[in-house]
Image (cartoon, grey):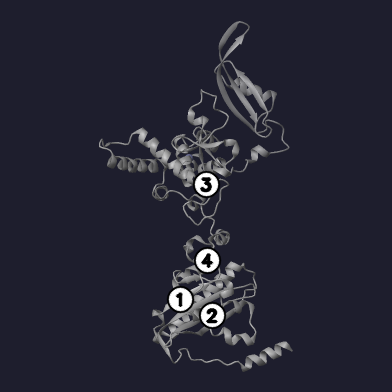
Amino acid sequence: MENVQVLNQLLKFEFSRKLKPGNAVGLPEIHGFCDGGEKAYGSALFLRWKLADGSYSCIPLMVKAFVAPLKKKSIPLLELMGCLSLARLYSTCKKALQFAEISQCKKVFWIDSQTVLTWLKTSPRKFKPFVSVRVAEIQETIGSEACKYIRSDHNPADVLTRGISPEKLKTWSEGPPFLKRPEPEWPKFQEDPLESGKELSEEMKRLNKFEAANTHEQVDYSATSTESNDNPILEHLMKSCFTFTKARRTLAYVLRFANNTRLKAKKKGAILPDELRESELWLFKWSQRTINVDTVDKKLIPASDKQGVLRAHGRLANIRSLPAEMRNPIILTKGHQLVNLLLKHLHEKRAHCGFKSLIYESRKRFWTVGVRNMAKQVTVKCVTCKRLRGQPLGQIMGQIPTLRVAAGFPAFNNTGIDLFGPLQLRIGRKTLKEVQVIIFTCMTTRAVHLELVTDRCVSRGFLTVCFTQRIPQ
Ligand SMILES: [Zn+2]
């Protein structure tokens, strides 16, 4: 009964189809709103006209709502679909209203999902296919610059997912109240970037950990590292250098250049070992910026040395025979690209050793969190190791000949014969002359008969077998 009343009210609903009020001045502004919910998603486009008396008027240009897919999707994905419908709505209106120069108007697209806004500001390549395709289309159509955050309670597209009673429809069609005020008086909607972090990471492709270390959007994948706040020089080095030695040498040249600009005695020629060591320390110091000291295992007793490098202070302080670097190893973070390059370097330096040797080698100077898995990955992915340790292709053995499997015959029916020697024959203390031995093997049972041959006449031994055993076939 209630539904019938609602339908009757809707039948009486009237609205003006005029898109431009009589007293409008200049070009309109386009304001798009979108929303996504469990049951539906949709979007609405409004034209905001400035009137001659200085006030503003909003007219709905196009409104579209869709039923949510039967296959359940998460709310951020439905919000993204709402945003995509807004982009398509705008694209349709732009084509239809070409004559009205709609493309030159100011455009604002209001989105009430911080996650979707963060997705739109990220490269689509980093997402899984569903999000990637949609983000790319939205970015091509409306771009990410025109998108703004709006709180759900101010979003007129919210009614597309929740529904609205017919009495309120008239007020709704006049647009959100804040658009009727001048722009400086609009409410400020603050974004909270932390909220979008979880969904962002869930929808991101499983990047190579070392690749992921370079992206500032990637969430914490290590127990010890906080968000990536690497030094920009280190980030650049990691992008441009593919070996640890190259990164170290490049930075050494950069440091030398920086020193040469300050000092009168300018260094020239090949890079010296001291310069390489200094460059190495800078690299490790920068990579340690991602480490949160509070989350490092307390047993390591982490503390910075004079040069500012974070080192572990374990229980080996009194072992004077050990080098200082081994007693207080440099703490390195899990999954950092620099650590990966370092392990590769050590693996090659130690003649492409196995992962256990690599761990041993790295522990001489470094304490890397999660070194076991990283060392395994480095050794497994090493192309040289694959080539050197590859197994040859196995052959399928041929069928056993009939002679070997002839059952039901006496032993030595089929016999193999060979002669071996010479051997020294000794009886008591006397050494006789050299002798040879004939070996008879039964082809079926593998029984063996040995016959001594004391002279060059083989026929005697052969005949002995023939008479005592059996004449072979
Ligand atoms: Zn290797």
Image quadrant in which the C terminus is located: top right
The answer for how far apart the CA atoms under marks 3 and 4 are is: 33 Å
Vertical order, 54 against 274 (above or below)? below
- The answer to whether residue 351 shows anywhere in this view is yes
Contact between labelled residues 4 and 1, with CB atoms less than 8 Å apart: no
Circle 2 packing at 10 Å, graded few (<14), some (14-19), many (20+), is some
Q: Which marked residue is nearer to the observer: mark 3 or mark 1?
A: 1
Pointer 1 residue: 183
Q: Residue 335 carries which label?
A: 3
Q: In which quarter of the image is residue 2?
A: bottom right
Image quadrant in which the N terminus is located: bottom right
Disc on the earlier residue, 3 or 1: 1
Q: Position of residue 153 (x, y in %)?
A: 59, 74
Disc on the earlier residue, 2 or 4: 2
Q: In this view, does 434 lie to the left or right of 464?
A: left
Secondary structure beneath dot 2 equals helix
Q: Position of residue 463 (x, y in %)?
A: 63, 23
Circle 3 packing at 10 Å, graded few (<14), some (14-19), many (20+), is many
Pointer 2 residue: 177
Disc on the earlier residue, 2 or 1: 2
Q: Position of residue 439 (x, y in %)?
A: 61, 25
Q: Which marked residue is nearer to the observer: mark 3 or mark 2?
A: 2
The residue type indicated by label 4 comes to Gln
Disc on the earlier residue, 3 or 2: 2
